[in-house]
Image (tube, coloured by chain):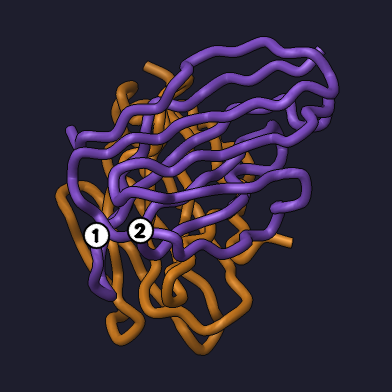
Chain colours: A orange, B purple
Amino acid sequence: SQQGEEDPQALSIQEGENATMNCSYKTSINNLQWYRQNSGRGLVHLILIRSNEREKHSGRLRVTLDTSKKSSSLLITASRAADTASYFCATDAGNKLTFGGGTRVLVKP
Amino acid sequence: DAGITQSPRHKVTETGTPVTLRCHQTENHRYMYWYRQDPGHGLRLIHYSYGVKDTDKGEVSDGYSVSRSKTEDFLLTLESATSSQTSVYFCAIRDRGRITEAFFGQGTRLTVV
C-alpha cells in the first residue's frame, strides 16, 4: 500500500472559492511535499514542509503538518481555473520519495 | 526546467518482449526514481537509485529491473512485458541533501498488447 493517501479523491469548486485537500501517511518522515500535475504532464513541485514545521505558506498555498496524527493539508485560496489539476502529497523518508493517489481538482469559471 | 529527458515518449510493444526505458539528466543529481502512474493508484515507486550502481526496490518492483552505470542515466527494463505493465512511466531526479524537491520528466506512455 502507498505511504500517502489523499482525501478527497476529487473536488469540484467555483472560481474564487478555496480548495482543501488532505493527506495521511503511515511512517515517520523527514518532510512532506505537495506536487501538482496538469493533464498529461509530469509533476511539478509546489511546496515542502519539514517534519519540525507546523504550517507553511507560499503565495495562495497554505500547508499544515500534524506529525502526531500523521496528516497534512493543502489549502488553495481564491482558486482560479488554471488551478485545475491533480494534486499529490509525497512523503520523504530518507532516500525514498513516496506519493499518494492524488486529489483531482476542477475549478469551474 | 530541470534537465531531465525520458525516452521514448510513447511505445507499443507485444507481450513477452523486453523493453527498456531511459531517463537522462543533465543536473548531476544524486537520486533518480522510476514511478508508474495508473488510474486509481496515483504514482507508485518502482525502483530508485541513490548513486551510481546503487539501487533499491520500491513498492511495485516485481517484473522490473534497473541499472545506473553513469550519474546521468537510469534505465528501467521490463524483461518480459505483460499487459499489466501498460502504464505511464515517470522518471524523477532529486539532488543530495535531506530537504530537496524532485523534478519530473514528461513521462513515457507504454502500451503492452
Q: Which quarter of the figure has residue A33? A: bottom left
Location of mark 1 (residue): B95
The chain letter for the residue carrying disc 1 is B
Work out how far the residue at label 2 is from the one at label 1, CA to CA, in angstroms.
Answer: 6 Å
Q: Nearer the viewer, residue B12 or A16?
A: B12
**Residue A91 x %, y %:** 47, 66
Quarter of the figure with the C terminus of chain B = top right
In screen coordinates, is A62 left or right of A87? Answer: left
**In the rendered structure, which amino acid carries the disc numbered 1?**
Asp
Are both tags, 2 and 1, on one chain? Answer: yes
Q: Secondary structure at mark 1?
A: loop
Subunit bearing disc 2: B
Q: Report the front residue among B81 and A29.
A: B81
Q: Is residue A84 visible?
A: no
Q: Is residue B49 visible?
A: yes
Taking A105 as reference, is A3 above or below it?
below
Q: Quadrant of residue A27?
A: bottom right
Question: What residue is drawn where x is 78% and y is 28%?
Answer: B81
In the image, B69 versus A2, the foreground residue is B69
Left or right: A45, with B33 as reference point: left
**Up-down: is B16 above or below A73?**
above
Mark earlier in primary sequence (2, 1): 2
Quarter assignment of residue B17: top right
- For this view, does A100 lie left or right of residue B17? left
Image quadrant where one finds the N terminus of chain B: top left
- Three-letter amino acid code at disc 2? Tyr
Q: Residue at x 58, y 29 (%)?
A: B20
The image position of residue A44, as x and y in percent, is 32, 39
Instruction: Confirm or deny contact between disc 2 and disc 1 (CB under 8 A).
Output: yes
- Crowd band around label 2 with a 10 angstrom C-alpha radius: few (<14), some (14–19), many (20+): many
Which of the labelled discs sits on residue B31, or is there none?
A: 2
